[in-house]
Amino acid sequence: MTPDENTKTPPTDVAIDDIVTDGPILAEGVDEEPVESNRRLFTGKMFLMIAAFSAFYSLFHMAALNGWSVSGLTGVDIALLPVLPMETWNFRIVHIAGALILGFLLYSARAFPDEDSGGKHPIDILTWLAILPALYACYTALGFATDIANGKMWNGIDDGIRNAEIYHFGLPLLVATTLGIVSGWARARVRGAIAPADIVLGVCSLAVALYLITIFGTLMRNSTGTPFAPIGMSIAAVAGTALIMELTRRVAGMALIVIAGVFLVYVFVGDLLPGFLNAPDITWQRFFSQVYTDAGILGPTTAVSSTYIILFIIFAAFLQASKVGDYFVNFAFAAAGRARGGPAKVSIFASGLMGMINGTSAGNVVATGSLTIPLMKKVGYQSKTSGAIEAAASTGGQIMPPIMGAGAFIMAEITGIPYTDITVAAIIPAVLYFASIYFMVDFEAAKLGMKGMREEDLPKFKELARQAFLFLPIIILIGALFMGYSVIRAGTLATASAAVVSWLTPHRMGFRSVIKAFELAGIMSIQIIAVCACAGIIVGVISLTGVGARFSSVLLDIAAANQLLALFFAMCIAILLGMGMPTTAAYAVAASVVAPGLIQLGIPTLTAHFFVFYFAVVSAITPPVALASYAAAGISGANPMATSVASFKIGISAFIVPFMFFYNSAILMDGTFIEIARAGTTGLIGVFLLSSAVQGWFWGARAGTLVRVIVGLAALCMIEGGLVSDALGVLLAGACFGLQKMFGAASGMAPSSPE
């Protein structure tokens, strides 16, 4: 899972002529992590220290989630770590604090210049001085812990305790946090060295965690949001919120920060707003004493990132270490490269496979697009079309079972629906989406008269088929889930199997490779953890102000006039909330704002959340802010806006399929076998006809305007899912086919000009 691609470059600069050679194409470097422009590159002892911390951070989660102990391994009754097993809130606090510390050490406040600028600077003196109040805040938090351990009663109304929390903990922490964030922007730094400001922020992150673990370990947990809450709890939450937002800005861009900032402002001005936006008057102490709990930052999003997400990031890191990603892409070339427009179809298959181990649409683009986009341009696709195909296909990786990025885990956490039920429900929609993109690129290739790639340019399918055992970790994951194992146990077994399978390849994973995989997982997890924590801020605002419930009432009012209009309105809000945001955060926010309203309309919980999830995902290819399309444009060299418009066109079915959920729940495996089979079949025919209408290619020939209109109507009839509408759709498509063959131009159905 990778950070925002506004700051990314592909792993290598690959020229077209370097890819298309007289020999077979072998994907290499697909599993390599691109280096962001603000990521530090360490060497020597510093590299070893950061690598060790990153590996320990991942291993800590694996141990905690599985309850590992030395007694379980050797029979000796000694805990692996004094903190295992951990209380839930404490575990989540440590989870966030570790990501903050590692993130500030790895990611600079801004991009590094082409030439590193070192030397001393007056701001450094001020920054280094800021570490003193940060350390003092840590010391004070430890002192509080000692006092509580010695039996001192702690409450939020004792003047002595209140003064100690304000002057000995709160003010030093806020001063250090503010100076650290501001001075981080002062000047460019040497890429191989950690800036003093980021050391300060790391210490501040530790101080926040120490205090919250201390206070939440007492009866004070029950006082959150009341006048009895210690003032230090609110101050620690203010600093923690600022630290989370700063790290999120560094690793995921400004979009989520702007939205989180708007919600935070809303907390304190909501009582001044009219209509459904009006909110109760909430003091900053009450709000912040509650936002850093399971009602906000430590809520569902962090619950998922600290369990399922980081576990599957470790799984993805093990797959990368064993070069399975390279194999997936090569397998896609061997399977689809011979078809007309071969590289575009390779992009579809490769992105779908990589989507199972990559958690962001834009990250998927960078991983596979650096190879497929130049090849698509080579065989005749326009630059914008090449980028659009990759963007649309990579976005589909987020809806591909069994992992579905991170959204499936958050959906399971929020709805209480078993994860396996969610992955099963996702099968037909995923098939429809990828089938639609396949039809789109195939019709485009047909219009342009393209052919497949040469046999000698492709990997040998028979040779790759002999390595099909590399799919075993995915198969074991799916099998374990449906055998009744927990998600954590299934993910652990799949991770272990990835290491075992690697011994059958040249990329054998020994002790060093395993540690390297854990190190990579720690780095990969930073963005998603920061994003989930930042989304938790927004979720906290929604739950504490009640704006979600008021938004639901607005949807109900609209639905009273027109239910389809209410769904359209919900779609627009979900896309708007998701623009420029990683999928995980986009869905988490939309699920809090939009999904409850849909459920109140009478839509089943699973259908409502899938509806929101799909539009949160496709926001990555929706103009004007389309992260996946922009990442693809960076590789193809096309205009970003033109690429985003083209990717919207290619992925148009994703904007139709969610409405299919509403009209026909059998699409989500809710119904009898016959109902599900009919829904899947008619849906597949519908997306075929929709692709024909959009691309202007119907049944082996260019389609004129009238043909495209009629075929489009037939597609909508088939997609609606009723028996009458299906019959009407078949009748329209059949009549259109007959008229085009019989009369051609004489019927007014002459082919339109090439696009």
Image (cartoon, rainbow, N blue to C red):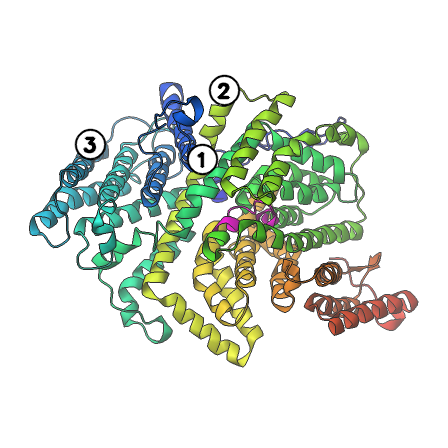
Q: Is residue 240 magenta?
A: no
Dot in front, 2 or 1: 1
Q: Which residue is mark 2?
A: 511
Tell me the kind of residue under disc 2.
Answer: Phe
Q: CA distance from mark 2 to mark 1?
A: 20 Å
Circle 2: element type = helix
Q: Residue 198's spot in the image, x, y percent? A: 30, 35
Is residue 623 depicted above or below 314 in this figure? below
Residue 125 is marked as 3
Q: Quadrant of residue 268?
A: bottom left
Q: First in sequence, mark 3 or 2: give its number.
A: 3
Circle 1: element type = helix
Q: Is residue 397 magenta?
A: yes
Is residue 152 depicted above or below 159 in this figure? above
User: What residue sits 59% from the left and 21% below the top?
Assistant: 508
User: What residue sits 91% from the left and 69% below the top?
Assistant: 743
- In the image shown, does 125 or 677 lie closer to the viewer? 677
Q: CB under 8 Å between callouts 3 and 2?
A: no
Tell me the kind of residue under disc 1.
Answer: Asn
Q: Quadrant of residue 364?
A: top right
Give the magenta range: 395-410
Residue 66 is marked as 1
- In the image shown, does 429 or 600 lie closer to the viewer? 600
User: What residue sits 13% from the left and 38% below the top?
Assistant: 150
Q: First in sequence, mark 2 or 1: give its number.
A: 1
Crowd class of label 3 (few under 14; some 14 to 19; many from 20; radius 10 Å): few
User: What residue sits 31% from the left and 40% below the top?
Assistant: 185
- Quarter containing the C terminus: bottom right
Tell me the kind of residue under disc 3.
Answer: Ile
